[in-house]
Structure formats: structure tokens, C-alpha cells
Amino acid sequence: MTPTDISARLATLRQEHRALDDQILRMAANGDDELEAKRLKRRKLQLKDCIAKLEDMLIPDEPA
């Protein structure tokens, strides 16, 4: 995966993460399905982990 590919993927994942955050907040405000909100929160955490891994891939290794 090239740095350009990683950056593009990061942008997509961050956008999805923000959209989930907005959706979770709306669901909480409306008192919607709690089980669905938990599922969305779990997906949001997965996205956060993927984002962190991709960001680590963009940081060059430091020489010892």
C-alpha cells in the first residue's frame, strides 16, 4: 500500500467515523434502539483502531 493509498483510506475511515458519531448522538437524543447504538459504537471503535494502524504505517521507522 502506497502512502497515497493509505491517506485516501484514512480520509474515508475518518469520514465514516464522524458520520457514526453523528448518528449515535442523534439516536441518543431521540431515545432510539439501544442495541443498534451499541452496534454502532462497536463499529466506531473498530474504525478508530484501523485509523490508528494506518497512521502508524505513515510514520517512518526511526533508526536505532
Image (cartoon, grey):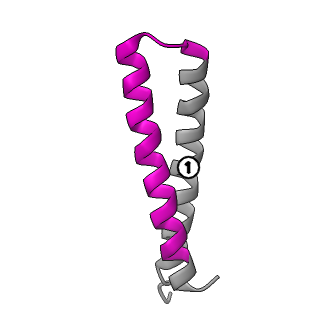
Say if the magenta span includes residue 14: yes
Q: Tell me the kind of residue under disc 1.
A: Leu
Residue drawn at 60 percent across, 45 percent down = 46
Q: In the visual, does 21 lie left or right of 5?
A: left
Q: Secondary structure at mark 1?
A: helix
Indicate whether 34 appears above or below 41. Answer: above
Q: Position of residue 3 (x, y in %)?
A: 52, 84
Residue farthest toward the bottom in the current orientation of the protein: 63
Q: In the rendering, at what x and y percent does residue 18 appear?
A: 40, 46
Q: Can you tell which quarter of the image residue 24 is in?
A: top left
Quadrant housing residue 23: top left
Residue plotted at (59% across, 33% down): 42
Q: Is residue 44 above or below residue 16?
A: above
Q: Is residue 34 above or below residue 36?
A: above
> From the image, which quarter does the N terminus lie in?
bottom right
Magenta region: 6-35
* Residue at image coords 57%, 79%: 5
Q: Which residue is mark 1?
A: 47
Pick the front one: 48 or 14: 14
User: Where in the figure is residue 6, as x and y percent of width and height?
Assistant: 55, 75
Find residue 50 and report its image quarter: bottom right
